[in-house]
Amino acid sequence: QVQLVESGGGSVQAGGSLRLSCAASGYTYSSNCMGWFRQAPGKEREGVAVIYTGGGGTDYADSVKGRFTISQDNAKNTVYLQMNNLKPEDTAMYYCAASSNWVGSQYFNPRRYNYWGQGTQVTVST
């Protein structure tokens, strides 16, 4: 059984930083893709960053490029999202996701991911 457990959310002021963690268990960690998505109230879930766990390649949404960094610790089966220079518009529930399928160019399509964590709230105030 695959489990993804997020941690690290919280409330910060604009310009602050947070680091989210996603610990994976029961998942063939080294062979596929893991991503961070977020969903604000009344909005669709959107992709933020992905990492290809085998090769370490990454992709980012334009809105977070230069501010967010996704990384992995293979020994701990954990993926991180370092978020710097946070803005109020980054406020959302953040979800970790993993795919056991090839996502190709659809890496920010939530339907391509078949495992999800429970989410961790990030709130950025002015």
Image: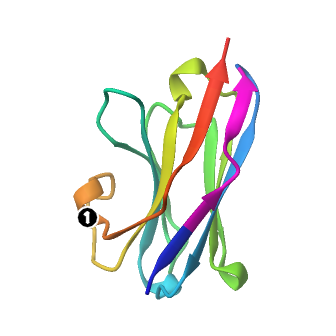
Magenta portion: prevailing SS class? strand
Q: Position of residue 71 (x, y in %)?
A: 64, 62
Q: Is residue 11 magenta?
A: yes
Q: Residue at x 42, y 31 (%)?
A: 40
For label 1, the residue is 112
Picture residue at 29% right of the left edge, 55% below the top: 110
Start-end of magenta stretch: 5-13
State the residue at coordinates (71%, 31%). Answer: 11
Looking at the rendered structure, the number of numbered marks drawn on it comes to 1
Could you tell me which quadrant the C terminus lies in? top right
Asked if residue 38 lies left or right of residue 16, the reply is: left
Q: Is residue 120 above or below residue 103?
A: above
Q: How is the image coloured?
A: rainbow
Circle 1 — which element?
helix
Tell me the crowding category of disc 1: few under 14, some 14 to 19, or many 20 or more residues within 10 angstroms, Cα based.
some
Q: Position of residue 5 (x, y in %)?
A: 58, 66
Q: Is residue 70 visible?
A: yes
In the image, is 57 to the left or to the right of 80? left
Nearest the eye: 13 or 121 = 121
User: Is residue 24 shown left or right of residue 126?
Assistant: left
